[in-house]
Amino acid sequence: MNKFTVIIGITFSLVSFAACESEYPIQKRVFPLKNIPKHVFNFPADKLRDTIITLFSLDNGKQYHDSVLIKIFYDAILNDKNMPCTFSVETSKDTIFSKKYFSNPKTANDLFLCSLGSFWFSKYYYSKDQPLEFISNFAIKFKKVDDSFTEVQIVADDPQVINGTKCCGFHGTYSKYTPVEPTLIEEYTLLQYIASKLGDTTLSPIKVPIIK
């Protein structure tokens, strides 16, 4: 093999490498009014926390086909099956996917919702006029107001969109994940889901971006 052949081979490899990578500008929809994913429930803190753990238990089955969750968390893979993605709840005592989150002692009383790798179509981020696939985990934080009332806040943990491809993994190209700011749409939807199961009808309707 002469030098010319080697140079041609390297050049071809670099061109092929570049060709299999892609990324597009991320756009944001018009969204002047944001949701506030925080609400005070008429429940003692411990009882509320235990109830929410039950609501997100995979054995419970309440998430499947839920009319609140499916409006936003429409699984991008199972969209033809009318199924929302499903979250797994973890506490500081049973960390599988949440070890990093609970390494902060200030999070000990929180709950962690893992999306288990599922992603859904974003209502806010898009590219080339198509919604981007969005993925995030979420934390549920509790603040005791008094013996009867507890404030719950939902916070996104490491939200990302899938935007293009990278090269090269063991099986070729793979999806490129880009960190993004939380939208507060998903967070508020989870809060609505909790409220609906607790019989709390005082939350305002969810706000979603304007689609022109």
Image (tube, rainbow, N blue to C red):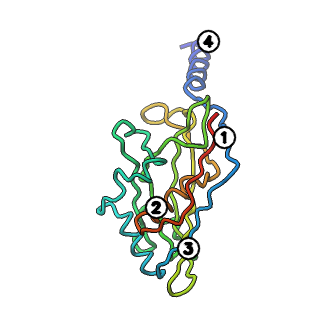
- The residue carrying mark 4 is 4
Q: Residue, x 54% and y 71% (percent of image)?
A: 152
Where is residue 155 drawn, in percent x and y? 57, 62
Q: Quadrant of residue 163?
A: top right
Residue 175 image offset from top left, x and y in percent:
51, 37
Q: Nearer the viewer, mark 1 or mark 2?
A: 1
Q: Decide: marks 3, 1 in contact (CB < 8 A)?
A: no
SS of the residue at dot 4? helix
- Among the two numbered marks 1 and 2 on one chain, the one whose residue lies closer to the N terminus: 1
Q: Quadrant of residue 21?
A: top right
Q: CA distance from mark 3 to mark 1?
A: 30 Å
Mark nearest the camera among 3 and 2 is 3
Q: Nearer the observer, disc 3 or disc 4?
A: 3
Which element carries disc 2, helix, strand or loop?
Answer: strand
Mark 2 sits on what residue? 113
Q: Pointer 3: what residue? A: 40
